[in-house]
Amino acid sequence: MFAFELGYEQTGCEGTDGPVVDWDAASCRDADSSLTGLFFSDEIPDILEAKRICQTCPVVAECLEGALSRREPWGVWGGELFLNGRVLSQKRKRGRPPKNPSPGIQLTA
Ligand code: SF4
């Protein structure tokens, strides 16, 4: 699912002359790839959970750099959500935006 499963561990994210990245330490790595669905989900709660996992990952910088250089088509990489090789600042809910957006929470004194 992730860089280490795609064979990037052979070269690291910085190319063959760069430092070797310890993908075994990745927070998303588990024996049965149980987190794959989370990191490639369209659901906002799943995306937020994947991003939360990335926050504690010791290879987050290398992961993000690699995903940017590979122009990942989709998924959460390095704590960011990718679509068509670009980082999305936020994921919108499915469907058309409401005609009359809710005013949000009003605080009154
Ligand atoms: S930064 Fe996120 S996607 Fe990248 S290796 Fe770490 S946990 Fe996995």
Image (tube, rainbow, N blue to C red):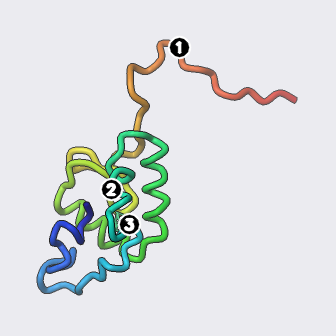
Disc 3 beta carbon < 8 A from ligand 1? Answer: yes
Q: Position of residue 52 (x, y in %)?
A: 49, 59
Q: Which residue is mark 3?
A: 28
Q: Secondary structure at mark 2?
A: helix
Kindly give the residue lying farthest to the left in the view shown: 16
**Measured along the vertical axis of the image, is residue 83 above or below residue 72?**
above
For discs 1 and 3, the disc positioned in front in the rendered view: 3
Q: CA distance from mark 2 to mark 3?
A: 8 Å
For discs 1 and 2, the disc positioned in front in the rendered view: 2
Q: CA distance from mark 1 to mark 2?
A: 36 Å
Q: Which residue is mark 2?
A: 36
Going 27% across and 81% down the picture, which residue do you hit? 21
Q: Quadrant of the C terminus?
A: top right
State which tag comes first along the sequence, 1 or 3. 3
Name the side, left or right, on which 56 lies relative to 18: right
**Measured along the vertical axis of the image, is residue 26 above or below residue 108?**
below
Q: Which residue is mark 1?
A: 100
Q: Amino acid at mark 1?
A: Asn
Q: Amino acid at mark 3?
A: Cys
Q: Position of residue 91 (x, y in %)?
A: 40, 39
Q: Quadrant of the N terminus?
A: bottom left
Q: Amino acid at mark 2?
A: Thr
Residues tagged 2 and 3 counted as in contact (Cβ below 8 A) = no
Q: Quadrant of ligand 1?
A: bottom left
